[in-house]
Image (cartoon, rainbow, N blue to C red):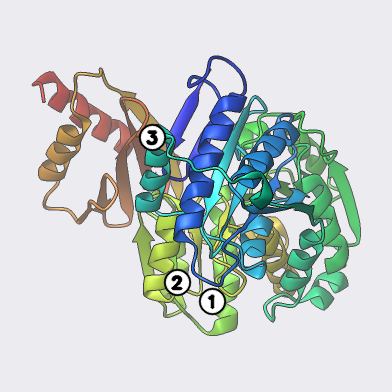
């Protein structure tokens, strides 16, 4: 049983002893802490007593939703429940409802035994590190003041926001449904039996996609495969596309904030290249602009940004950090290399749905196949590794030593240590939950990226051997 308490929310496996899994008592404690924080933080005259709630389709979703709703009502907060929804839909609904905040019940790409409370501020964006610490402190102290019977909050169900979200996407000047309809695309959708199974086909129909083949689109929450949209988990959709009857495959994670694409021959487009392709389209349409991704994302985004005359910036890993950097640099698009697209014109949150609309417009207007479009971008390969350390080893000291060792190279230390070697790079990050250093290396070939990663791992082992 696992319970992970972090600044962005609470996630864990359902069941087990209190404090060791995500039990009903843990759900109530952290919902009460967040509700108490939201009441103290929300601006005056801005929906002070309202929280928006939504969930993905996982098996525990309804139970957790009822617990969270009742707890918030007990604090005197009104709850608008979107029901089965998506993370980006909840993010858009919070400011639309002028709410004090929002809670998304999803463990994202984690397996079905997991669930989580993801926490939003009044702008519909993930709470900051400082705000997250305040929520955790409230949970620890249990400093809750529940409302008397005459001031309990009200509950209402509003299932209209999915449609509002989709209409807002189609209204974007960058989305061209006529161009998509003219291509008469044949698309396969894998939504891992969660919310995307309802929402993605609805979006594709509105965009004028000709043929939609649904794969794992029943929102039962009984995930048909590991829900993280990585190549090793997408064999089913790859087999369908290998037969040659479709133009592309679309894959989303359970809460629909990550987008992976599959080419017409069953090969992976590459989740790192979801953002690259969409950003390329946006930059072309806008005549340039700035972009942001996190430090562990491919250099290809920087290449297409600079080619368009814009400036690329790298943020610390985590959506909240990417959003902060996007606002600072006035970026026209950003996201993360895990298939997360953030279009400020719509909202500041990763949104697979707007990613789908923008990508299909790009593909339609390009006149290319998926494989030819992918080949038009700089080709990089990322080797992802980790090294486990014993609890007595100070990982901060290890990273500091690595920074010193490569001091002659460009080094970025805003999130671990990222070392650049011309167009190659290595990013070292420590885990916040276990004694692990994650090591990502990128080069223009798999072999070189793997060699670079192994060289860095050897350096770390050498540092460890002399005791740090």
The residue closer to the viewer here, 317 or 338, is: 317
Q: Name the residue that disc number 3 marks.
A: 141
Above or below, 403 relative to 199: above
Q: Where residue 296 appears, x then y in whole percent?
A: 39, 48
Q: CA distance from mark 1 to mark 3?
A: 48 Å
Around disc 3, counting alpha carbons within 10 Å, would you say few (fewer than 14), some (14 to 19), or many (20 or more)? few
| Residues under numbered marks 2 and 1 in contact, where contact means CB atoms less than 8 Å apart | yes
User: Do we see residue 367 in this rendering?
Assistant: no
Sequence-wise, the earlier of marks 3 and 2 is 3
Image position of 361 (left or right of 204): left
The residue closer to the viewer here, 21 or 279, is: 21
| Residues under numbered marks 3 and 2 in contact, where contact means CB atoms less than 8 Å apart | no
Q: Residue at x 54, y 76 (%)?
A: 283
Around disc 1, counting alpha carbons within 10 Å, would you say few (fewer than 14), some (14 to 19), or many (20 or more)? many
Q: Residue at x 79, y 41 (%)?
A: 242
Q: CA distance from mark 2 to mark 1?
A: 7 Å
Q: Name the residue that disc number 2 marks.
A: 305
Q: Name the residue that disc number 1 marks.
A: 283
Q: Where residue 291 appears, x then y in whole percent?
A: 45, 69
Sequence-wise, the earlier of marks 2 and 1 is 1
| Residues under numbered marks 1 and 3 in contact, where contact means CB atoms less than 8 Å apart | no
Sequence-wise, the earlier of marks 1 and 3 is 3
Q: Secondary structure at mark 3?
A: helix
Image position of 251 (left or right of 449): right
């Amino acid at each position: 049983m696992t319970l992970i308490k972090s600044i962005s929310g609470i996630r864990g496996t359902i069941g087990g002893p209190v404090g060791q899994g995500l039990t009903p008592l843990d759900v109530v404690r952290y919902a009460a802490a967040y509700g108490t924080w939201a009441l103290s933080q929300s601006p005056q005259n801005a929906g002070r007593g309202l929280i928006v709630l939504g969930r993905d389709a996982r098996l525990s979703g309804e139970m957790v939703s009822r617990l969270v709703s009742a707890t918030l009502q007990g604090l005197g907060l009104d709850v608008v429940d979107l029901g089965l929804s998506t993370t980006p839909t909840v993010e858009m609904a919070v400011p639309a409802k002028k709410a004090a905040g929002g809670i998304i019940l999803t463990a994202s790409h984690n397996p079905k035994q997991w669930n989580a409370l993801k926490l939003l501020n009044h702008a519909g964006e993930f709470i900051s590190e400082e705000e997250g610490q305040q929520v955790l402190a409230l949970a620890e102290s249990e400093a809750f003041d529940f409302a008397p019977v005459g001031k309990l909050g009200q509950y209402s169900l509003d299932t209209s926001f999915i449609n509002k979200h989709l209409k807002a996407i189609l209204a974007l000047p960058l989305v061209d449904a006529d161009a998509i309809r003219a291509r008469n695309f044949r698309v396969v959708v894998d939504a891992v039996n969660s919310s995307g199974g309802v929402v993605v086909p609805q979006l594709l129909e509105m965009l004028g996609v000709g043929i939609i083949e649904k794969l794992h689109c029943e929102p039962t929450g009984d995930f048909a495969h590991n829900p993280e949209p990585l190549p090793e988990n997408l064999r089913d959709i790859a087999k369908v596309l290998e037969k040659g009857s479709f133009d592309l495959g679309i894959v989303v994670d359970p809460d629909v904030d990550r987008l992976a694409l599959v080419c017409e021959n069953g090969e992976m487009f590459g989740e790192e290249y979801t953002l690259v392709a969409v950003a390329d389209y946006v930059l072309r349409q806008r005549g340039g602009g700035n972009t942001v991704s996190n430090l562990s994302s491919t250099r290809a985004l920087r290449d297409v940004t600079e080619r368009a005359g814009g400036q690329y910036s790298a943020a610390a890993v985590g959506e909240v950090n990417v959003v902060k950097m996007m606002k600072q640099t006035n970026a026209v698009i950003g996201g993360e290399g895990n298939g997360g697209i953030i279009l400020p014109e719509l909202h500041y949150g990763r949104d697979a749905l707007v990613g789908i609309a923008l990508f299909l417009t790009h593909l339609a207007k390009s006149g290319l196949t998926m494989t030819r479009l992918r080949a038009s971008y700089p080709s990089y390969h990322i080797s992802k590794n980790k090294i486990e350390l014993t609890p007595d080893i100070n990982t901060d000291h290890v990273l500091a030593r690595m920074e010193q060792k490569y001091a002659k190279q460009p080094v970025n230390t805003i999130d671990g240590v990222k070392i650049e070697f011309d167009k190659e790079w290595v990013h070292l990050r420590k885990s916040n939950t276990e004694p692990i250093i994650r090591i990502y290396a990128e080069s223009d070939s798999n072999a070189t990226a793997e060699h670079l990663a192994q060289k860095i791992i050897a350096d770390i082992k050498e540092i460890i051997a002399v005791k740090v």
